[in-house]
Amino acid sequence: MHYFPSFSIKSYYFFLLVSFVFCKTSSIAQDTLSNIHIISEIKIIGNKTTKAHIISRELPFAIQDTISINELNKTLERAQSNLMNTLLFNFVNLEVVYFTDTYISVYITVEERWYWWPIPIFEVEETNFNTWWKTKDFDRANYGMFLAKENFRGRKERLVFKLQGGYTEKAEFRYHVPFANKKQTQGFMIGFSYSRNHEVVYNTTDNKRDFLKINEQFIKKEFVSKFNYEYRPKLYNTHLLGIQHHYLEVNDTILMLNKDFLFTQDNELNYFSLLYNFRRDKRNFKSYPTKGYFVEFSAVKNGLGITKKENSSMFLLGSYRKYWELSNRFYFATSLKGKYSIERPPFALLSGLGYNNNLVRGYEFYVINGENYAFFKSQLRYALVKDKVYHARILSAEKFRKIPIAVYPGVFFDAGYVDDKKLKNTNILNNEMLFGVGASLDLSTYYDIVFRVEYSINRMQEHGLFLHFIAPL
């Protein structure tokens, strides 16, 4: 007769339970593995100048990371946008090579831009191109030589020398190092510039600029030196802390024409500024975005109590831009930007609407300066030509032969308001709602080039055709 221990039946059931749990867990683990990819290799091709670690810094994944099968295409698209937004490449292509159903390799092929830019300068010194085209006054043009080394040392550094004459005689040097530490999270920029003018805008009347010009002498001289520290812990957020020194000297006649030009009877300003800036950038392409969003906030304090000939002012500046892909061809974008002055600056440091892209469309021929302002932009666009690449074999330089083209017709609506009680009596658009509507045709191509032709109508029923060279929002 055989005798069995009394606990053998319990042990048997316990064994069955453990086996069931183990098999179930193995099945779940197997299902999980079948739904993910593990990156076992990242291969970079075509980076003759750019260091590999500069490219890897922009990727939202690394070796041994796991990516859901459903998220793979979205992740690769985000990586492509990140690399294009470095402004180092004309084209970026990502492909997946499958080692197994689970393990993959990501091949990144880049076509680098032209990085040396020794080009002659011809630029108009106006609020925007349309203001200059109205007069075609070549006395308000700058000329000279601009030398920039993009992607210096293959580390995305930028070295700039500028020497120009014309309306503003200027000498400038800038050196930007985005990644100064091993973790590639900290950077800096150092810059110096000296400029002088025979002509100065000393006030505004009827929202047009008032000029004073003396051919025999320079009536405005300015020296600026700056140092910025940047902190970018991950991919999309950047913090900047900057300190600047400004020295500004103007002719006494300017102070007689506008006592608020410097807020002092002394013809000099000598002051330090402190700047904080935060940016979160998740646009698909900086030069002409169609998807994503951009957030920016700045706080600036002029006059830190260090020098005697200074003026104290402070303001806050914020903006938000959002871009939607409504369908394969239709896109919608909005932006909101505003400024609030805690301390009113002198006229020499006063800004507002009407400058470059800081405007309500339809008011290109006006400037609306003020302590506080806010404006809204919106645009509906249709991709008539979407991401086409043309091969210009006539061009000998390889980095210019492939020309990407995108064409977007659209319609827009803008609105804005500038608050400033001091300038209200002589400028009718201050403290008034501004509206502008119209139709647009945008062309985007390589090297961040954008051409815009817009037909606008403002609230005063003024209308016209305007040309711009930057994305609308």
Image: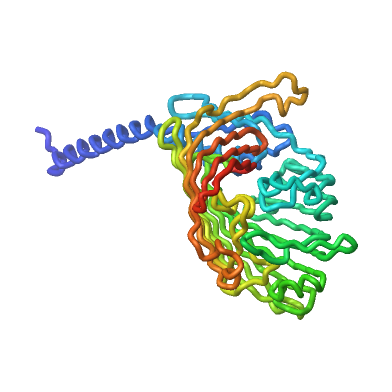
Question: How many callouts does the rendering have?
Answer: 0
234 or 38, which is in the foreground? 234
Against 405, residue 167 (above or below) is below
Q: Residue furthest front?
A: 461
Left or right: 202 in relation to 434 = right
219 or 196, which is in the foreground? 219
What x and y, as percent, mark residue 414? Answer: 49, 50
Q: Residue at x 55, y 40 (%)?
A: 455
What x and y, as percent, mark residue 458? Answer: 52, 50
Left or right: 118 in relation to 43 = right
Q: Residue 220, can we see it?
A: yes
What x and y, as percent, mark residue 460? Answer: 51, 53
Against 241, residue 267 (above or below) is below
Q: Residue at x 65, y 33 (%)?
A: 446
Q: Residue furthest top?
A: 393
Q: Residue 72, can we see it?
A: no
Q: Quadrant of the N terminus?
A: top left
- Quadrant of residue 454 within the rendered picture: top right
- Quadrant of residue 266 within the rendered picture: bottom right
408 or 434, which is in the foreground? 434
Left or right: 411 in relation to 231 = left
Q: Residue furthest right?
A: 216
